[in-house]
Image: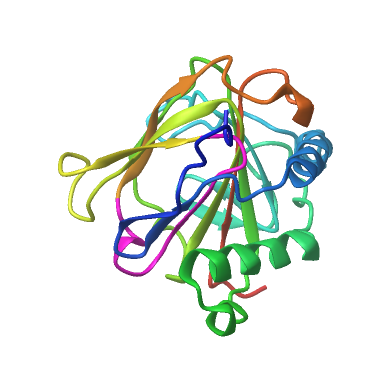
């Protein structure tokens, strides 16, 4: 769990990649858990994404603003129920700007950050995420990642391949991770979730929620 007697320091993990522990207050964690439960019900419900090769992702995903399916964004979820995804709320956009400002220490620059989609992934104790690049966006604005619930091993790699060199970072409930600049197209993944390490006071009894905010660079 985050916090404790020995608070974890903010860390620049790689150029453009910054880890800010316990960035979300307990109140904001609870607010996000409540909101994620509502978003998971629809209009496009949470689902396991089917990959082009027929594989099924172990995480369950729901989207806001734009619907992501491998490997493109659409306004409607043709691979689920054909409905238009829920809008990205303005308060979450503001949180994204705050996150970029706090990670990079540049409030003026962060004011231009305008995420228009959120991918919300739920990991149970056995779920993982393979090494991949976030490259379906037309914008190279930073990706903002928020974690709630069980901690995980987050692996940040290089921009050339899924292999080494990479760096493993422990992400705990409430942590912020921002990657942009030279790390924007770095391969990254989640090889392990640590069940039972979350904070039940958020209303999440088990598992990990990961909310990522992005600019798609797409028009309407």
Vertical comparison of 69 with 219: above or below: above
Q: Please state which of residues 74 and 100 is positioned toward the viewer in this rendering.
A: 100
Question: What is the total number of numbered labels drawn onto the structure image?
Answer: 0
Q: Is residue 177 magenta?
A: yes
Residue toward you, 197 or 32: 197
Task: Confirm whether residue 215 shows in the render.
Answer: no
- Can residue 13 be seen here? The reply is yes
Q: Going by the image, does 145 lie left or right of 189? A: right
Q: Where is residue 171 in the image (x, y as percent from the top left)?
A: 48, 37
Comparing 100 with 180, the one in front is: 100
Give the residue at x 57% y 34%.
Answer: 2
Q: With respect to residue 185, does 169 lie above or below?
A: above
Which residue is the extreme one toward the front?
5
Q: Is residue 128 left or right of residue 209?
A: left
Residue at 61%, 22% (x, y): give it.
Answer: 207
The N terminus, quarter of image: top right
| Magenta residue check for 8 | no
Residue 93 in percent (x, y) is at: 70, 65
Q: Could you tell whether 137 is left or right of 117 in the image?
A: left
Counting from the top left corner in percent of width and height, residue 200 is at 73, 22
**Could you tell me residue 117's position as x and y percent?**
63, 59
* Residue stretch rendered in magenta on the structure: 172-186
Q: In which quarter of the image is the C terminus?
A: bottom right
What's the coloring here? Answer: rainbow
Quadrant position of residue 170: top left
Residue beneath the point at 66% across and 18% down: 206
Q: In which quarter of the image is residue 153?
A: top left
């Amino acid at each position: 769990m985050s916090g404790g007697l020995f608070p974890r320091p903010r860390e620049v993990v790689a150029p453009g990649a910054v880890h800010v522990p316990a960035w979300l207050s307990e109140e904001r964690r609870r607010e996000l858990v409540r909101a994620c439960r509502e978003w998971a019900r629809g209009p496009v419900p949470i689902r396991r994404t089917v990959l082009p090769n027929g594989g099924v992702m172990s995480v369950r995903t729901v989207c806001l603003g734009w619907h992501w399916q491998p490997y493109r964004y659409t306004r409607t979820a043709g691979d689920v129920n054909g409905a238009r995804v829920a809008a990205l709320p303005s308060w979450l956009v503001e949180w994204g700007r705050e996150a970029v400002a706090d990670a990079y220490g540049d409030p003026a620059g962060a004011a231009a950050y305008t995420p228009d989609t959120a991918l919300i992934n739920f990991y149970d104790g056995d779920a993982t995420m393979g090494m991949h690049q976030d490259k379906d966006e037309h914008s190279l604005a930073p990706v903002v990642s928020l974690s709630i619930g069980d901690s995980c091993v987050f692996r940040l790699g290089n921009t050339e391949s899924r292999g080494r060199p990479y760096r493993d970072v422990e992400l705990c409930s409430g942590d912020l991770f921002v990657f942009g600049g030279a790390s924007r197209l770095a391969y990254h993944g989640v090889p392990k979730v640590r069940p039972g390490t979350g904070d039940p006071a958020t209303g999440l009894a088990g598992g990990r929620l990961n909310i990522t905010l992005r600019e798609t660079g797409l028009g309407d």
